Amino acid sequence: MTEYGPGQGPGPKPIDDDGLARLLGEQQFAVLATNRKNGHPHLSTVVYAWDPAERIVRISTTAGRAKVKQIRNDPRAALHASGPDHLSFAVAEGTAELSETSTEPGDATGRELLAMTPGFPDPADERAFLEQMVKDERLVIRLYVDRLYGTVLR
């Protein structure tokens, strides 16, 4: 067993792109960072879906949220996901875009939101979901990832 002096411990080790993509895919909660008009960051805990093939993070939100207004003003954003042990993390940086708000059950935004939500075997459940997306004024934040980085402490 390695012993470390006071205030010391194992140093961080970078994670390769495959490991970062895997970490993002294994988590469902993360922190989204957007930019306020005054330059300060705005952080929101979000549920997300990671598409490693397209390198897109999708986040369901409602039209009136601060993060939506901030992305309209400045599309730069980052997502920070911790590993289950909180000793590893991945950050996905990129440019965000907003889908249209769902306005009709079964519209393109509603279908995209449905695809982000696993398992609707009963068509009545699917219909109720799509109707709720309209009532909630839901839309999708798509973060197009151009930079992935992170570390692990072991």
Image (spheres, helix red, strand yellow):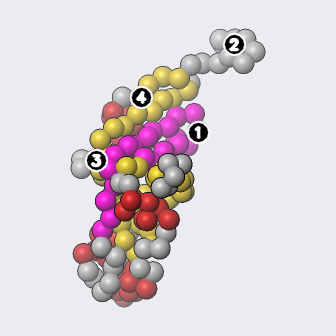
CB within 8 Å, label 2 to label 4: no
Q: Quadrant of the C terminus?
A: top right
Tell me if residue 113 comes above or below residue 129 in the rendering. Answer: above
CB within 8 Å, label 3 to label 2: no
State the mark number for residue 4: 2
In the rendered structure, which disc, 2 or 4, sits on the residue that comes first in sequence? 2
Nearer to me, 79 or 15: 79
Q: Residue at x 53, y 42 (%)?
A: 82
Q: Quadrant of the N terminus?
A: top right
Q: What is the total number of numbered labels drawn onto the structure image? A: 4
Q: Which residue is mark 1?
A: 86
Marks 2 and 4 sit apart, C-alpha to C-alpha, by 23 Å
In the rendered structure, which disc, 2 or 1, sits on the residue that comes first in sequence? 2
Marks 2 and 1 sit apart, C-alpha to C-alpha, by 20 Å
Stretch in magenta: 78-99
Q: Residue at x 43, y 65 (%)?
A: 69
Marks 3 and 1 sit apart, C-alpha to C-alpha, by 23 Å
Relative horizontal placement of residue 129, taking residue 52 as reference (left or right):
right
Q: Which amino acid type is shown beneath numbered disc 2?
A: Tyr
In the rendered structure, which disc, 3 or 1, sits on the residue that comes first in sequence? 3
In the rendered structure, which disc, 4 or 1, sits on the residue that comes first in sequence? 4
Q: Residue at x 34, y 76 (%)?
A: 101
Marks 3 and 4 sit apart, C-alpha to C-alpha, by 17 Å
State the mark number for residue 15: 4
State the mark number for residue 55: 3
CB within 8 Å, label 4 to label 1: no
